[in-house]
Image (tube, rainbow, N blue to C red):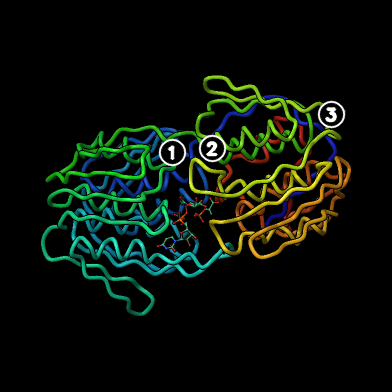
Amino acid sequence: MEKMIVEGGRPLEGEVVISGAKNAALPLIAATLLAPGVHVLRNVPDLRDTRTILSLLDELGATWRRDGGTLFIDSSSIAYTEVSYDLVKTMRASVLVLGPLLGRLGRAKVSLPGGCAIGERPINFHINGFERFGVTCHLEHGYVEALIDGRLQGTTVYFDIPSVTGTENILMAAVLAEGTTILRNAAREPEIGNLIDMLVGMGAEIDGKGSSQLTIRGVDQLQPAEIEIIPDRIEAGTYLIAGAAAGGEVTVRDCRPEHLPALLDKLAESGARVTVGERSVTLCLEPRDRNRLKGVDIKTMPYPGYPTDLQAQFMALMTLSNGMCVIRETIFENRFMHVAELRRMGADIRTEGNNAVVTGRGPNGLSGAPVMATDLRASSSLVIAGLAAANRTEIARIYHLERGYENLVAKLSGLGASVWKEKA
Ligand SMILES: CC(=O)N[C@H]1[C@@H](OP(=O)(O)OP(=O)(O)OC[C@H]2O[C@@H](n3ccc(=O)[nH]c3=O)[C@H](O)[C@@H]2O)O[C@H](CO)[C@@H](O)[C@@H]1O
Ligand SMILES: C=C(OP(=O)(O)O)C(=O)O
């Protein structure tokens, strides 16, 4: 196992190129199961999670090859329709193969994901949605077995909460169903727009992209796709927050600023200078101005609200402010695992249910410490805290970071950070 060492206290300066989005790559790779033939996916990040979903395709009988950022996936012969616990337990998004397998083959058996560090995360919306198409789902020995005799039947599905992977799974099932399907209160995250573009390119008929109501007219068959994965808005946001925490001037390149509306507003409100280009954002906070960083409240919400996947990172920034703020987590019931670790670095944070009250200790308020990563974004908040802290921070269990940040050490080093990995 490896740990990450961060020698803090250096400003960040320079440009960082943003990779393809993990949360877009995963459903788009799953969607290749919908049509036989060779699919071409560009700008695919090389991450632990993308490797996991590719192993899952191997298990199902698809073949693939990677050439740089481009993946060629041949899903002509799907020999199996079962996904084992070994894969699902390392990556919940493995459930994304349920929709395409049901749409194309009418059957799928996938291990039920358990809870995880950030919450219980049931998949009842996915299962209820499949049942609306006429699919029979039952749970046995920890697996969901879903089956339909014949074709899925178009239906309406209402989401109690706009679930991201729930919307993606039902959408992928609906494109090959007989008749029209309407999804209400669907999630509107940009990654879903990327998936819709891919499906439409394959011959699917979908209206309502970007809205909470999607209308899908089922087609008899689809062609292989050629599509580019959108830039990772969470990775971009993480580097911008890191720039504000450490001070300096950071430009994130090859990103889509319009996918970060809430964060860019909050960063500007905190006192950083944010300059938006067509495909880039520059954040500037002179090291001498860090003592003017303000406390800014955030409340996590489905898109276009403030993303839960950037909550932990913003909290790390707020521990360095010169005011107080309240951070409300409304998406996951247990997404404050980073709080205890940030406290070990000197942060003043009090939690009450899903609220965290952060009293900033000013730009020099954190000191390096050995800390432990508990999930992907909690880990990146510790990296941010480490970059701003005096002395050395050692972060254990960094495999979490490898799930979602491509070339993190190289990218941070390129910005002037002193950061490296060591054997733990
Ligand atoms: C691979 C991927 O894209 N992951 C993202 C996706 O996760 P994921 O798609 O799992 O998250 P959801 O949008 O489904 O979850 C939102 C809320 O709905 C609840 N829920 C969801 C499904 C369900 O069947 N029943 C239910 O109760 C969840 O427990 C949670 O409280 O969206 C989250 C919210 O933006 C992000 O943090 C994750 O990074
Ligand atoms: C929670 C996340 O991912 P996942 O849904 O794959 O666990 C994340 O990307 O922050």
Depth order, front residue of 349/378 = 349
Whether residue 311 is visible here, answered yes or no, is: yes
Would you name the residue on which mark 2 appears? 233
Determine whether label 2 and label 1 are within 8 Å by CB.
Answer: yes
Label at residue 289: 3
Counting residues from the N terminus, which is met first, the one under dot 3 or under dot 2? 2
Q: Residue at x 48, y 66 (%)?
A: 89
Secondary-structure class at tag 2: helix
Secondary-structure class at tag 3: helix
Image quarter hosting the N terminus = bottom right
Q: Position of residue 181 (x, y in %)?
A: 21, 50
Q: Residue at x 24, y 44 (%)?
A: 215
As drawn, is 355 to the left or to the right of 110?
A: right
Secondary-structure class at tag 1: helix
Whether residue 7 is visible here, answered yes or no, is: no
Would you name the residue on which mark 1 appears? 190
Measure the alpha-carbon separation of dots 3 and 2. Answer: 26 Å
